[in-house]
Image (tube, coloured by chain):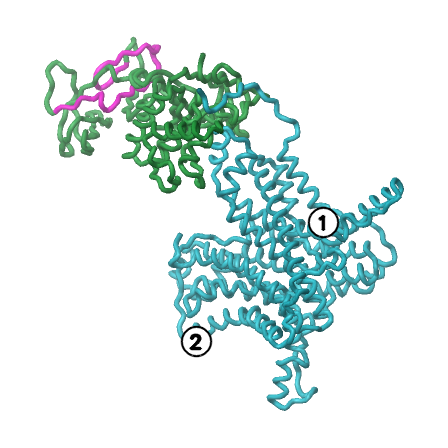
């Protein structure tokens, strides 16, 4: 039985079509990420699943029970789902303890308190139970929001951009805690984010959304290794785009032909990740390398980001490990890792 | 083990008529009754009495009302906008004091200032007596303006109503883009030019809104014009109802008065946009302020001090003097009883107004449909309607209902039920709700808007129904604002005169009624006790507003 199943759901706000014929399922214990740019409709999917929006067409079931279909609506308070909001939405007038206990229906104070402390303990905040939300840091507030969502033991947890309110340094730490708490609770999770790295970190499965539709679904590695479109490839990191035309199962590039199964004569774009370009100062033996010159170099710490110009004038972004300080105009050799070059029909 | 009992998710069919829509509709419908009743009298033929009114007093009512509006409009605009411009954009001695002190006259009801000036300025009053004594003048040796005149009414009403314009103008000047004003400065515009070419045009919507509010209060006034013997629509409605015993004709006068209000209301709605008159912006922004020295500084101080002196300190001084001079201070058992009556009415109306406002505001939040928005707007239109009009609109249908019930009871059981609605607390409380619901609604809506939507969503997802969320989340968060709203309604009820006068239960006197009765009998010295009590209550909202201004002052960055 699936924890959440969304079948052919479409949703419009007035004239604006937010979600179009979308289907998605989450298995018990699985973490699924909806990944997409802002405005692609991913938050709407979350609100539909929570019952905060009514289903206009299609159907949504939780644990095999129909909860939403045209003319049928189980209100959010009867769905037993947990939702962590982007702004955390902690109740400012309640202590952390009462925030976490807000969704507990048990009237037995002992059991109630035990459950609250367990939920807070899972996120490492048992000591903060008597504090008020404004006394906590952003990262702690996020963890309280998670504890509050998990305390009633929901079968499905929904996370709406849960880390976007945090600064980058906090994010990694809170992400670890969140993932651990989710795994421990064993609940099914649907998370929405626009950050591909975050999705890859958290998810068992990622669904990439664009303008209300899912364009590709798979494991993080699948999506990174085998993007089905230029959009997906670009979403998982910077890419270089080279224009070309398919012919005899190949596309000609400055690095030599790249294989494709697109029909002859198709206008294509070859997407190349920066890390797929090997940069060296001397010609490598046996490697098919082409000469280029450095346009700019930005040392970033762990790696250096280069912009280089090929002899035909086209500029490419490359990334190499370590700090590296070439001068503008320095000659380099570029070689392509063909496993990370993707050919797509041009838009 | 599960703490959260999982209800089996059986699909629920939603009811055809939504409860919240129904609730807002019901409130709007009830609140609109008096206004609809009065308007309907435009179509009722009343024969002789109306043509008699139209040919005799109606032209006078219209002329006086228009002159009053013109005078008060210009007066409040000049004082309100001028002082607001001075205190927001200039530095001079006492500026931070004037920022809030300019509001003090708001605490003085029009009829109270009328009683004090009426006594101060008349032939036997201290001003004229003093002049005669100082210069040895006789009765016919000098000219002195007659205070009991249209001009006198305009003057005293201006003195207590200019704070409406001041409040909105001040907020507008504070919110004006600093860059725009500084750009004006760099382009070489002097202070006067900046005021007339940049500041005023930008603040025009706020100024129009402020003046329309002051004019609505002017139309509402009964005590001042009656004391100064200026015949306007309000006095006319009273004379026709009580003097001539012609409720229908009084209702028709009320309907004509409503037409004036509709014009003002359109003007105000059109100009106000989303601004609210009970709240000033709480955030402080550094404004370019011009330091005044020497004579300009002295003029600025005088320009700000004069309205406060004349609109607050003088009337308060006169009242205190009366209180001290009169042997029996007037703070006796009778006074306690009046205070109890006033406070009872105020508390009942304030609590009901806040509860209804919360239903309206929360209903509009849960169901932001055009229909609900329309109901909410209809329910809060009464703030523009003069108390006398509302009173007529309440009295006529309530009396009819009472007669019907009484007749039915007599026919069926042979007993008389007497008055159930009219002439009881129900009628007068209902009139207060019609008139003051907008005040508490605006406060409830504004503070509810500050609570993020995700709070509601979080409550729902955690298993609470909307009504439970209202109780568990919104009520605690809104408590300070709702208390402030209740205070505003409470004070307005204490000050209210025309509706109370028509609708109060027989022999049920309040502080305002008592002051009015004493003033009509020219027993002015005894007015001091009730008037001072009303004035003290009126200081409550002034303090609230002054505090929000204090927060927006330099050094109080929030």
Q: Secondary structure at mark 1?
A: helix
Residue A161 in view of the camera: no
The residue where tag 1 is placed is B426
Question: Dot 1 falls on which chain?
Answer: B
Circles 2 and 1: CB distance less than 8 Å?
no
Residue for point 10% across, 15% down: A285
> Any idea which chain is the green one in this picture?
A
The quarter of the displayed image where residue A43 is located: top left
The residue where tag 2 is placed is B295
Residue for point 47% across, 35% down: B454
> Any idea which chain is the cyan one in this picture?
B
Look at the image and give the residue range highlighted in magenta. A251-280
> Residue placed farthest to the bottom in the image?
B136
Give x and y (percent) for residue A35.
38, 24
Residue B238 in view of the camera: yes
Residue for point 48% across, 25% down: A50
> Residue placed farthest to the top in the image?
A248
């Amino acid at each position: 039985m699936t924890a959440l199943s969304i079948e052919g759901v479409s949703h419009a706000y007035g004239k604006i079509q937010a979600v179009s014929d979308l289907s998605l399922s989450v298995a018990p214990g699985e973490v699924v990420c909806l990944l997409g740019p802002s405005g692609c409709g991913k938050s709407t999917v979350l609100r539909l699943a929570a019952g905060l929006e009514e289903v206009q067409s299609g159907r949504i079931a939780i644990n095999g029970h129909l909860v939403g279909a045209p003319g049928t609506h189980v209100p959010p308070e009867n769905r037993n789902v947990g939702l962590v909001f982007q702004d955390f939405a902690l109740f400012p007038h309640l202590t952390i303890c009462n925030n976490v206990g807000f969704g507990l229906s048990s009237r037995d104070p002992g059991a109630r308190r035990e459950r609250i402390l367990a939920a807070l303990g899972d996120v490492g905040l048992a000591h903060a139970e008597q504090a008020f939300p404004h006394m906590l840091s952003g990262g702690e507030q996020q963890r309280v929001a998670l504890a509050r969502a998990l305390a009633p033991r929901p079968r499905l947890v929904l996370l709406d951009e849960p880390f976007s309110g945090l600064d980058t340094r906090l994010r990694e730490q809170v992400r670890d805690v969140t993932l651990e708490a989710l795994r421990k609770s064993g609940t099914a999770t649907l998370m929405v984010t626009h950050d591909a790295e975050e999705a890859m970190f958290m998810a068992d499965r990622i669904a990439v959304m664009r303008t209300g539709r899912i364009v590709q679904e798979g494991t993080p590695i699948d999506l990174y290794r085998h993007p089905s479109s230029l959009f997906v490839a670009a979403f998982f990191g910077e890419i270089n785009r080279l224009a070309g035309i398919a012919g005899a199962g190949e596309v000609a590039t400055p690095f030599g032909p790249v294989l494709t199964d697109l029909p002859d004569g198709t206008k294509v774009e070859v997407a190349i990740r920066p890390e797929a370009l090997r940069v060296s100062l001397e010609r490598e033996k046996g490697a098919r390398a082409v000469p280029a010159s450095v346009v700019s170099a930005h040392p970033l710490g762990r790696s250096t980001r280069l912009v280089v110009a090929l002899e035909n004038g086209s500029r490419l972004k490359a990334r190499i490990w370590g700090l590296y300080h070439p001068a503008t105009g320095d000659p380099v050799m570029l070689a392509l890792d063909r496993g990370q070059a993707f050919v797509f029909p041009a838009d | 083990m599960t703490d959260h009992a999982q209800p089996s998710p059986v699909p629920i069919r939603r009811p055809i008529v939504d409860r919240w829509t129904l609730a807002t509709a019901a409130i709007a419908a009830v609140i609109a009754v008096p206004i609809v009743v009065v308007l309907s009298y435009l179509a009722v033929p009343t024969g002789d009495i109306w043509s008699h009114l139209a040919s005799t007093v109606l032209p006078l009512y219209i002329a006086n009302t228009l002159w009053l509006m013109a005078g008060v409009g210009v007066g409040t605009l000049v004082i309100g906008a001028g002082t607001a411009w001075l205190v927001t954009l200039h530095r001079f001695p006492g500026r931070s004091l004037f920022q809030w002190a300019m509001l003090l006259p708001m605490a003085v009801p029009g009829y109270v200032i009328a009683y004090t000036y009426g006594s101060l300025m008349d032939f036997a009053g201290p001003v004229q007596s003093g002049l005669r004594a100082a210069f040895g003048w006789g009765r016919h040796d000098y000219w002195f303006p007659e205070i009991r005149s249209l001009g006198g009414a305009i003057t005293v009403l201006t003195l207590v109503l200019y704070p409406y314009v001041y409040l909105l103008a001040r907020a507008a000047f504070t919110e004006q883009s600093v860059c725009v004003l500084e750009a004006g400065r760099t382009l070489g515009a002097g202070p006067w030019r900046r005021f007339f070419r940049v500041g005023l045009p930008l603040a025009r919507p706020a100024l129009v809104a402020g003046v329309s509010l002051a004019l609505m209060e002017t139309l509402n006034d009964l005590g001042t014009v009656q004391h100064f013997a200026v015949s306007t629509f309000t006095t006319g409605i009273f004379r026709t109802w009580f003097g001539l015993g012609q409720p229908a004709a009084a209702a028709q006068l009320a309907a004509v008065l409503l037409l004036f209000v509709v014009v003002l209301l359109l003007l105000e709605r059109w100009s106000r946009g989303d601004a609210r008159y009970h709240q000033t912006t709480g955030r402080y922004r550094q404004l370019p302020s011009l330091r005044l020295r020497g004579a300009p500084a002295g003029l600025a101080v005088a320009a700000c001090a004069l309205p406060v002196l004349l609109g607050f300190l003088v009337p308060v001084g006169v009242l205190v003097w009366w209180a001290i001079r009169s042997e029996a201070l007037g703070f006796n058992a009778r006074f306690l009883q009046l205070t109890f009556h006033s406070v009872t009415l105020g508390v009942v109306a304030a609590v009901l107004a806040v509860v209804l406002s919360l239903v309206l505001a929360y209903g509009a939040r849960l169901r932001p449909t055009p229909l609900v928005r329309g109901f909410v707007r209809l329910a809060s239109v009464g703030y523009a309607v003069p108390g006398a009009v509302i009173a007529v609109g309440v009295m006529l249908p309530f009396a009819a209902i009472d007669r019907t019930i009484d007749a039915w009871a007599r026919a069926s059981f042979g007993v008389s039920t007497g008055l159930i609605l009219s002439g009881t607390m129900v009628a007068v409380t209902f009139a207060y709700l019609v008139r003051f619901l907008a005040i508490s609604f605006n406060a409830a809506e504004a503070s509810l808007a500050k609570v993020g939507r995700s709070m509601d969503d979080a409550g729902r997802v955690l298993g609470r129904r909307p009504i439970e969320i209202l109780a568990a989340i919104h009520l605690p968060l809104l408590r300070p604002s709702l208390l402030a709203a209740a205070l505003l309604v409470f004070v307005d009820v204490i000050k209210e005169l025309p509706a109370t006068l028509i609708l109060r239960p027989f022999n049920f006197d309040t502080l305002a009624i008592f002051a009015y009765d004493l003033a009509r009998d020219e027993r002015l010295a005894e007015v001091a006790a009730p008037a001072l009590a009303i004035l003290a209550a009126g200081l409550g909202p002034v303090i609230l507003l002054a505090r929000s201004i204090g927060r927006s002052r330099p050094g109080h960055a929030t």
